[in-house]
Every structure is written in structure tokens, then in C-alpha cells.
Image: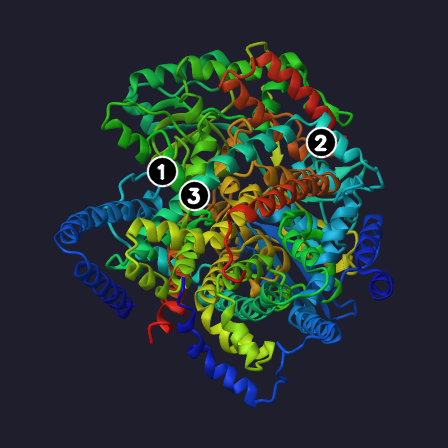
């Protein structure tokens, strides 16, 4: 990574135009603290301008329902009946009197722990293979992305029975090895597993993000490295992987959040009730059931905020850990 | 009301405004959109169902608009699975449609929640089946007008019986034991992959089953069924699996309760329990003749337990500013022979004598079969269920869940029954 | 599309040749082995591709079967082919299916443009600028994607109905212009942070303002990230069901996902055939957009650096 000289020319036109436009120069000459302060204030002002749409959205659109649901989590808000303030009751009931809540939490945790690493490994491995200049890259990429397009379709409910049902494809496949399988979607000990497979199967999104990330790595780095005599493996570990860490980190954080909120696939496959015997009852599905089937939206809100807390803690841990393994080029 | 809420939105912290709006919503009252002026009324009408129902309902509505100049109908429909998401969001936001369809499991909850208007005297109910009409009333207030009726019955795929070389049973005198034995025998003599029956854990079956023991499903807002009956019911499902009358646990769960993929519809099962209005789908799916049979009895000489179920109700929003026009539409949909002819048996077999006379001959073969079945059993049926307690909408899910616990041996029938009864009673109120 | 793998292949050949030139026979041997293995790579990729393709094949096959036999007939290859489902499905609803595609297209186009504009602006601020409470706001930004949608639906409905936005496309488009999809802000922050800072520092020294750096350096170099954002926004908006269901109750405003479910009825009157047929048709635009968009996934520094 010693080839910094290569890029400034490319940035030159913009810079030249910029100075022509008369933007005040002399950012580096500022020795006086007053000047630094002024510069900082100006940068903060510019930052807020860039953030303006987001701030407006946050205040006018995002925060209102968000805060409303936080407030409602301390009530027994019911969509049909009268309701009132109940303090921390919802939160207490959840952890002490609601075995289904615990069940949903456990199911979701297992799902997250298994499917996120699997899906990311798949996505990264295929992105790397495809990025190596495989012929017909765009065809493979498109084909691999297809399941992600179908992922939320109602047709998945039927499809998944076709694949993992008692007379499904998977059992036909096992039949070649003389093994007679059961209905994988109907057995409470395997149903969750089929949802993990479904999630891994839609690895297209993180794969595309990985591919985009790989394309963002300047080829000059590799050129420089091969001139220095670094092999494929060395290049991978000293260039590709470190430079990809922000993207890996992004995928990890987002897939973790996404998996904890996973709803549609389990809802569609299980018919919305976490069948069989609550083995696919996901956290958000339970939130949904409480909110829209039992109309106990206050309780559902409380559960949702516990989920926010769980995800927030995990994300914070993720960010803390990222200091040790994520490498940013801008530092 | 609306202006008041808007006021809040502008002045106070926005988040509190929403909460405030919700509080006001919960208190009821207020008006919801629409014209209001005479001769220029827009009614929002909501229902669930497939493209077919949507087409014929809109056709009927067009007829209504023709006859009632100045009233425009704005339909809102969605598939059943998401219908209540939409409806309850609107109800909670004080923005309910003027007219909406609701099925009996949610009817009681919404009616008691003050969501619906009293239709007494506003809709002509003279020709409606009186017992059925009663199911749309709570404490004498008519919150809903039933659109038609179904019965929960046994269906038999005659081709499967034929292939097995077995006769259809005599359904006037058969017991649960007979049903179990016959199903097991069917499985045994049929090709592999073909079963005698398909497990059902529909609450309608439990209603029949408990009525045969002389028990009401609900009494005073609580579960009226005894734990023993529920235990027997779970045990019976388990027996079906254990004796090979039905597919094993995992397969049974996989098959679920979808009509199109059911055993009868795919010619892989001899019998099953379905609503009479599902006969058409079962027949066309299988391409074979499917027969209707009475539910087996308990062999105790008691009631047969079968009942007429109101398929759904039309209700009018209590917040609607145009309740009279809304009631007029409901009246048209349930009483007008022309509307009846267009809708056929889509919302249940018509239980309105004048409509029935007008449409009977035009009904498809399966519907005529169901109709004559309902007439055959009319002397034996119990009264239709009355509005269910609040929270009853969750009971079917509870039954499915505990049934599954039983199939996989995670609970004994007795354990499942005990837990079901206690969870059900805390859900109901 | 074709030009793409040409570039890929071209670039690879150059690299291979370079390497072969650098080393001698040992390298050639490795290269040969590598070539041999490439065949296996392709076989593996193709087999894997078939697994991935199965659902689509199945759906197309189901859409071509007469409706009565869809669930009776097990095989992937239909015994008789009919286009009835397509004809019936297209005309089954209140409007021709194109009407719903058009509605979806408006919402989707609005969402894509909104996300590209608003999220990239916010991302630049988080990735490149210093301002007070930056970490706090970043945490808030991430926090907004942690709450499950279901519990905010009712408050959202009240909010939008107060604004008079129910049964308009505003609730589905306007928030995108206000960067409420924090997912994409975070995505772009991460991408921008992989860009070496000396690029914009050099420009800064030359006196360029932040707007100029953003629009002339960061945006062009972030093409892959922008393409990713556009593709995902397009697909997710096109497939999004729940919010479109809740905010668009008037059937004239219905979108593709809502219209598709109109074919289904859990009590047994579903039109599965037309549903499959229209699902296949509805896949067209998203797949087309993906194909078009993925062209830009290879640009960015990769190609501009070579020029």
C-alpha cells in the first residue's frame, strides 16, 4: 500500500474546479487555535446541512411512532378495549409469567447464532469465488441472487413443503443413500433448521454487498503487492481481508439485527402460528401475535423494546470489538 | 374530535399527540371521513377474500350504486391473513370503514369494544333464519347481520373408498370408534401414501365433540368445556396417529389445514373434516366425487352436536357518520334477490328464505349438495353459536399448539388439556 | 452485461500473464493446476446454481399447469402447458395487473431516488465530517432500525392519517427522502470509510469544499455502494407487503404484493394458478433492475483506477 501517488491525479480535476470556484484555501496553514475552532464550527455546520434531511425525518417521522410505542409499553394498550398505565407490569410478566416469551427468545437466539455465521460464510465464500474473475460472473451472480428475490413471496410456503416435506426433494435425495426422512417442516425438532436453511439460501444480499466491497478495493494495491512478490494467499490476507473488514462488519451488524427481527419467512412457512408446537415461534412473530391477534399492543410494544435493548447491547459489543479487527482506510 | 386531535398535533410534543389521539380513540366517538351531506355520500366497505369474492361483491355493489344515486362505495379488501391487521389498525386509529365483514371468532370482541353500530330496525331481518340472526346479537343488540351459514362435517373422497374396495359408512349411526376403525382400515388396504383420514384440530370439531357430552363451548365468558372432554379430544387425535388412521405427527403438521393441499383434494386421503363451503374446492382439487357425511356421535344417545355456523357478519362502524346509508347497503347485500344471485354461496349458503328461493337453481352442483345436506340435518342441529367471548379469536391457535404438543409426545393429552383450559380462561374475558 | 465478463476475463488474463512472466516453470505448473481446478469450480458453481434456480423453475412450471392439477401433479415438468393462468391472472382483479405494477413502480422509483439522495448525504456526514455528538447521533441512527415494525404501525397510521396521507403514496415515498432507511446510511458509511482519505484531503488542500468533495469524489467512487442501495431499495420496496397493505387500503392504490395476495383465501377459494403466474410476471421488473444495476457493481475505483 505504498502507491498513494497514483490517485491524486484522478482527484485533481475536482480539486482544480474547486479552487477555481473560489472556495477559501489555507486549511493547513491554520496554526492558531481560533482558526481551528472556526474551522471545526464550520465543519459541524456543514455536517448538519448534510444531515438535515435525516434530522427532519428523525423528528417528524421516525421518532413519533417510536416514542409512542415506548410510552405504550408501560400501558396495557389494547387495540379494542380501554387501557391505562401499568408501569413495568408488561416487562415483569414477560420474564416471569410468559413461557412463550422465553420460548420465542430461545428460538430466535438459536436461529441467529446458527444462521448468521452460516449465511455470511456462504456469502463471503461465493463472493470471493465469483470475484476471482470467473467467466460468466454476472450470470452466476444473478442466479444466486434469485432466491433473495423470492424470499418473502407467499409461494415460499408451498415451495418449502415441496423441498422439506415428507415427500419432498430433500427426502428424495436422502433416499439415494437409503435414508428415509420424515417431514422436516412438520417435526418440531427440525422445523427451525429448515428456516435456518431458508435464511442461508437467501444469502444473495450479503453476497452482493461483499462483491461491491471487493470491487471497491483499488486494484493498484494488488498490482503493487504482486510486484513485491506476494502470492494469492498473502494478497488475500494482507489486502483483501483487511480492506473488506468494514463490509464484513457491516454485514455482521445488519444480519444480526435482521435475524433477530426475522419475521416474514417464518410467518409464511409456519402459517403465522409458529407451528409445529411453537418450534418456529420467532420473537417478532410473537410480538405480532400479541399485537394483532390478541390486540394486546401494549404488551407487544414492551416486548419490542426488550428486543431493541437486546439488539442494542449486541450491536454495541460488536462496535467495541470492531476496534480490534476492523480496518478503515480513512484512518 | 378530529380538529381537537389535530390541534394537539400542532401544539404539544408530537409524540404525545399521537398518544393523545390514541387515548381519544380508545374512548370512542368522533366521525370518520366521508361526505356527510345528503346526496353525496361515500361509504367505505371492507371485506376479506379472494379475487373471486372481490369480483362478485363489486358487482353486487355496482347494482346498489345504480339503485341508490348519490351513494358511492369505496371498497377495501385484503386477504384473510392480513384483514384484521388492516381493520384493527383502522379501528385503533379511529378510522374504521363504514361497513365491514367480520367472522364470529372476532365478532364478540369488536362488538363489545364499542366498535359497531346497532343495526336493529335498520336492516330488514324478516326473511333471515332466526336462530342464525341471534348469533349476531349481544344482549339484544343486533351488531351484525349473518351473511349465510356453513356446517362442519365429514367429507369423503369416493374414489379412495372405491380403490380400497370399501363402502361409504352409514352416517346416521356411526360413532367416533367407527370413524377411527374405518380410517385405520382405509389406510391399511389402500396404496402406501394414501390414508384413511387427516387430523383436524379445528375448534368447530371440539364444539361438536363437547356438545355430544352436553357441554357448551363457552359459558359466561369462560370456557364451558371440561378438562376431561378436552383430554378425550386430544387423546382421540393421538389415537388417529397411533393407529395409522392418519399420517404421523410431522406429516399431519405439514399437511396443516390448507384445503387445496389436503389429503382429499390430492386423492391421498379418504376422509376429513371440513366446512360445507369447502366442498367445491375439495371436489375440483381432487377431480373426484366428494360426499358429505354427518359427524360421528359419542354413542351416548345425546345430541349429534352439529350446528349451523354463521359464515360471517356484515357490521356497521359505530363511528360512521353515515350509518343509515351503511345499513341500507347491508340490507341490500343480505336481502336483495339480485344481490343474492350475484353472490351465490360465496359468503355461506344463503339463510334468507326469499334470497334462497331466488338463487337455489343457479347455485353450482356442490353448493346444492351442501344445501340439501344442511336441510337433511336441520332437525338434528344445535342452535348456532352466539357471539363468542372477547379473546375467543385466539382459541383456535391454542388448540393447534396444544394438539401439536400432544402429537409429538411432549405432553400427554391430560397435561395438554389442563394447560389449554387454564391458558384459554386467562385469554378469555 | 457481456462487456462485463469481457472486462473480467481481460483483467484476469493480464494478471495471469504477469504472474507467469514473473516466475518460471513452477508458476506455470501452478497455473495449469489452477486452470484444471477452474473446471471444477464451474461444475460446482453450476450445480449450486441449479439448487438456487429450483424455486424459480418450480414457480414457472406451476404457473403453466392447469389450476386444478397444481397440487395433484408432483413433477417439475408440466404434463400439459396452458397460459390460462396468465390470462386469468392479468384480468382477475379490479384493474389489469399492469395497474398494480404501475403503482409499485411509482413507489419504488420514489423510494430509490429518495434513498440515494438522502442516505448518501447523511452517510457523508457520518463518514467524513466531525461534529458534536456524532457518536450519539450515529447510535440513534442505528437504533431506529432496531424496533420491529409491527408495534409502530398503529402510531404510524395515526400520524399519516393526521397528515391526510392514507391512500396516497406519500407514506411510502416521503420518508425515504428523509433518510429514514438507516440501513442504507450505515451501508454507505461503511463503504465511504473504505475509501482512502488522502483523496479528499488532497482536494481539501486544493481548496475544494465538502459539497464538491462529496459530489465529485465520494459519489463517483461509491458507485458500487450506490448501486447496492438502489438494487436493495428497489427489491425491498417492490416486495414490501405490510406497510403497503396498511397505508393503501383503496384498491385503486393497491400494489403488486397486495394484489398478489388477493388471489389467496385461507378458507379455500384461492386462485393459486393466477397467483403463480402473476408472481412470475412481478419478478420481471426486480430481476431486470438487478441485472441492470449489477453492471455498476463492477465500477467504482476498480475501473476508474485503470483508466
* Residue count near mark 2 (Cα–Cα under 10 Å), binned few <14, some 14–19, many ≥20: some
Q: Circle 2 sits in a helix, a strand or a loop, which is it?
A: helix
Q: Position of residue B344 (x, y in %)?
A: 52, 48
Kindly tell me whether residue B66 is visible in this rendering. no
Q: What residue is rendered at 63% in x and 48% in y?
A: C146
Answer above or below: position of C180 versus B273: below
Task: Return the residue at label 1.
Answer: A162
Give whichever of discs 3 and 1 has the lower sequence position.
Answer: 3
Count of marks, rendered view: 3
| Chain of the residue that carries numbered disc 3 in the rendered image | A
Residue at the image position 74 percent from the left and 72 percent from the top: A33
Mark 3, other Cα within 10 Å: few <14 / some 14–19 / many ≥20: many
Q: Position of residue B237 (x, y in %)?
A: 50, 18
For label 3, the residue is: A119
Q: Residue at x 49, y 72 (%)?
A: C199
Give how far across and how far down residue B191 sits, in percent. Answer: 27, 22
The Cα atoms of the two marked residues, 3 and 1, are separated by 22 Å
Q: Is residue B15 left or right of residue C234?
A: right
Q: Residue at x 44, y 28 (%)?
A: A190
Residue with the mark numbered 2: A94
Of all chains, the one bearing label 2 is A
| Chain where mark 1 sits | A
* CA distance separating discs 2 and 3: 31 Å
Compared to residue B197, the image places residue C172 above or below, namely: below
Amino acid at each position: 500500500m505504498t502507491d498513494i501517488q497514483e490517485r491524486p491525479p484522478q482527484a485533481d480535476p475536482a480539486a482544480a474546479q474547486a479552487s477555481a470556484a473560489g472556495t477559501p484555501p489555507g486549511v493547513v496553514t491554520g496554526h492558531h487555535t481560533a482558526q481551528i475552532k472556526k474551522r471545526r464550527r464550520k465543519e459541524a455546520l456543514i455536517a448538519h446541512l448534510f444531515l438535515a434531511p435525516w434530522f427532519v425525518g428523525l423528528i417528524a417521522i421516525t421518532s413519533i411512532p417510536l416514542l409512542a410505542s415506548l410510552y405504550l409499553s408501560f400501558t396495557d394498550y389494547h387495540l379494542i378495549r380501554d387501557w391505562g398505565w401499568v408501569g413495568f407490569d408488561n416487562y415483569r410478566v414477560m420474564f416471569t409469567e410468559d413461557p412463550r416469551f422465553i420460548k420465542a427468545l430461545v428460538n430466535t437466539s438459536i436461529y441467529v447464532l446458527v444462521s448468521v455465521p452460516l449465511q455470511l460464510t456462504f456469502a463471503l465464500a461465493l463472493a470471493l469465488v465469483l470475484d476471482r474473475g470467473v467467466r460468466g460472473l454476472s450470470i452466476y451472480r444473478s442466479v444466486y441472487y434469485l432466491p433473495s428475490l423470492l424470499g418473502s413471496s407467499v409461494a415460499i410456503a408451498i415451495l418449502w413443503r415441496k423441498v422439506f416435506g415428507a415427500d419432498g426433494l430433500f427426502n428424495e435425495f436422502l433416499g439415494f443413500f437409503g435414508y428415509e426422512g420424515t417431514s422436516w417442516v412438520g417435526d418440531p425438532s427440525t422445523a427451525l433448521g429448515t428456516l435456518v436453511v431458508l435464511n442461508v439460501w437467501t444469502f444473495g444480499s450479503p453476497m452482493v454487498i461483499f462483491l461491491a466491497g471487493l470491487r471497491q478495493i483499488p486494484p493498484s494495491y494488488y498490482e503493487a503487492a504482486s510486484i513485491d512478490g506476494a502470492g494469492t494467499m498473502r494478497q488475500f490476507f494482507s489486502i483483501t481481508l483487511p480492506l473488506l473488514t468494514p463490509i464484513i462488519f457491516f454485514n455482521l451488524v445488519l444480519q444480526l439485527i435482521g435475524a433477530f427481527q426475522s419475521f416474514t419467512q417464518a410467518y409464511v412457512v409456519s402459517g403465522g402460528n409458529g407451528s409445529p408446537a411453537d418450534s418456529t415461534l420467532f420473537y417478532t412473530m410473537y410480538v405480532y401475535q400479541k399485537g394483532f391477534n390478541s390486540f394486546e399492543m401494549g404488551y407487544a410494544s414492551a416486548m419490542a423494546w426488550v428486543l431493541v435493548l437486546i439488539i442494542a447491547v449486541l450491536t454495541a459489543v460488536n462496535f467495541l470489538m470492531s476496534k480490534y479487527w476492523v480496518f478503515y482506510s480513512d484512518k | 374530535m378530529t380538529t381537537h386531535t389535530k390541534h394537539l398535533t400542532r401544539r404539544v410534543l408530537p409524540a404525545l399527540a399521537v398518544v393523545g389521539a390514541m387515548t381519544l380513540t380508545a374512548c370512542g366517538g368522533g366521525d370518520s371521513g366521508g361526505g356527510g351531506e345528503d346526496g353525496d355520500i361515500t361509504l367505505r366497505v371492507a371485506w376479506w377474500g379472494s379475487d373471486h369474492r372481490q369480483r362478485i361483491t363489486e358487482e353486487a355493489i355496482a347494482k346498489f350504486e345504480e339503485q341508490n344515486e348519490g351513494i358511492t362505495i369505496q371498497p377495501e379488501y385484503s386477504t384473510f391473513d392480513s384483514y384484521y391487521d388492516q381493520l384493527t389498525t383502522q379501528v385503533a386509529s379511529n378510522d374504521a370503514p363504514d361497513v365491514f365483514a367480520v367472522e364470529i371468532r372476532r365478532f364478540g370482541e369488536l362488538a363489545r369494544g364499542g366498535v359497531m353500530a346497532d343495526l336493529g330496525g335498520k336492516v330488514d331481518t324478516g326473511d333471515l333464519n332466526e336462530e342464525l340472526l341471534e348469533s349476531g346479537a349481544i344482549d339484544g343488540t343486533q351488531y351484525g347481520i349473518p351473511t349465510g351459514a356453513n356446517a362442519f362435517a365429514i367429507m369423503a373422497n369416493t374414489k379412495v373408498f372405491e380403490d380400497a374396495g370399501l363402502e361409504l359408512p352409514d352416517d346416521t349411526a356411526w360413532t367416533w370408534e367407527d370413524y377411527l376403525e374405518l380410517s385405520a382400515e382405509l389406510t391399511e388396504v389402500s396404496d402406501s401414501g394414501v390414508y384413511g383420514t387427516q387430523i383436524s384440530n379445528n375448534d368447530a370439531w371440539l364444539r361438536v365433540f363437547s356438545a355430544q357430552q352436553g357441554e357448551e363451548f363457552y359459558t359466561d365468558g369462560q370456557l364451558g368445556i371440561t378438562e376431561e372432554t378436552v383430554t378425550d379430544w386430544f387423546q382421540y387425535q393421538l389415537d388417529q396417529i397411533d393407529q395409522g388412521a392418519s399420517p404421523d405427527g410431522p406429516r399431519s403438521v405439514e399437511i396443516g389445514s390448507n384445503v387445496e393441499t389436503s389429503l382429499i383434494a390430492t386423492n391421498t386421503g379418504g376422509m376429513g373434516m371440513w366446512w360445507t363451503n369447502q366442498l367445491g374446492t375439495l371436489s375440483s382439487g381432487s377431480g373426484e366425487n366428494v360426499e358429505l357425511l354427518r359427524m360421528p356421535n359419542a354413542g351416548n344417545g345425546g345430541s349429534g352436536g352439529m350446528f349451523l355456523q354463521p359464515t360471517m357478519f356484515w357490521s356497521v362502524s359505530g363511528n360512521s357518520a353515515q350509518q343509515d346509508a351503511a345499513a341500507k347497503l347491508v340490507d341490500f347485500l343480505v336481502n336483495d334477490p339480485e344481490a343474492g344471485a350475484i353472490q351465490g354461496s360465496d359468503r355461506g349458503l344463503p339463510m334468507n328464505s326469499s334470497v334462497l328461493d331466488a338463487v337455489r337453481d343457479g347455485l353450482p352442483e356442490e353448493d346444492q349438495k351442501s344445501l340439501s345436506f344442511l336441510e337433511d340435518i336441520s332437525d338434528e342441529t344445535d342452535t348456532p353459536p352466539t357471539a363468542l367471548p372477547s379473546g375467543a379469536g385466539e382459541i383456535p391457535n391454542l388448540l393447534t399448539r396444544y394438539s401439536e404438543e400432544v402429537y409429538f409426545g411432549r405432553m400427554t393429552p391430560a397435561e395438554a388439556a389442563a394447560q389449554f383450559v387454564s391458558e384459554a380462561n386467562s385469554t378469555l374475558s | 452485461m457481456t462487456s462485463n465478463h469481457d472486462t473480467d476475463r481481460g483483467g484476469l488474463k493480464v494478471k495471469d500473464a504477469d504472474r507467469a512472466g514473473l516466475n518460471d516453470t513452477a508458476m506455470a505448473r501452478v497455473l495449469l493446476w489452477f486452470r484444471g481446478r477452474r473446471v471444477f469450480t464451474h461444475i460446482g458453481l453450476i450445480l449450486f446454481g441449479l439448487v438456487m434456480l429450483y424455486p424459480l423453475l418450480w414457480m414457472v412450471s406451476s404457473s403453466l399447469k392447469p389450476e386444478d392439477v397444481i397440487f395433484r401433479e408432483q413433477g417439475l415438468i408440466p404434463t400439459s402447458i396452458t397460459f390460462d393462468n396468465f390470462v386469468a391472472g392479468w384480468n382477475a382483479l379490479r384493474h389489469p395487473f399492469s395497474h398494480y405494477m404501475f403503482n409499485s413502480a411509482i413507489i419504488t422509483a420514489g423510494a430509490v431516488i429518495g434513498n440515494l439522495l438522502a442516505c448518501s448525504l447523511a452517510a457523508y456526514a457520518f463518514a467524513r465530517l466531525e461534529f458534536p455528538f456524532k457518536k450519539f447521533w450515529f447510535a440513534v441512527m442505528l437504533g431506529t432500525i432496531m424496533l420491529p415494525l409491527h408495534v409502530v404501525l398503529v402510531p404510524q397510521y395515526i400520524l399519516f392519517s393526521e397528515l391526510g396521507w392514507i391512500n396516497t403514496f406519500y407514506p411510502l415515498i416521503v420518508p425515504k427522502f428523509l433518510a429514514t432507511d438507516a440501513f442504507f446510511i450505515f451501508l454507505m458509511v461503511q463503504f465511504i470509510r473504505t475509501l482512502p482519505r488522502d483523496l479528499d484531503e488532497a482536494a481539501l488542500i486544493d481548496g475544494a469544499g465538502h459539497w464538491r468533495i462529496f459530489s465529485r469524489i465520494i459519489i463517483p467512487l461509491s458507485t458500487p455502494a450506490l448501486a447496492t442501495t438502489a438494487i436493495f431499495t428497489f427489491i425491498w420496496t417492490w416486495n414490501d407487503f405490510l406497510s403497503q397493505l396498511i397505508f393503501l387500503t383503496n384498491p385503486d392504490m393497491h400494489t403488486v404484493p397486495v394484489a398478489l395476495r388477493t388471489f389467496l383465501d385461507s378458507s379455500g377459494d384461492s386462485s393459486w394458478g393466477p397467483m403463480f403466474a402473476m408472481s412470475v410476471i412481478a419478478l420481471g421488473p426486480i430481476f431486470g433492475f438487478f441485472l441492470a444495476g449489477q453492471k455498476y457493481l463492477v465500477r467504482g475505483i476498480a475501473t476508474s483506477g485503470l483508466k
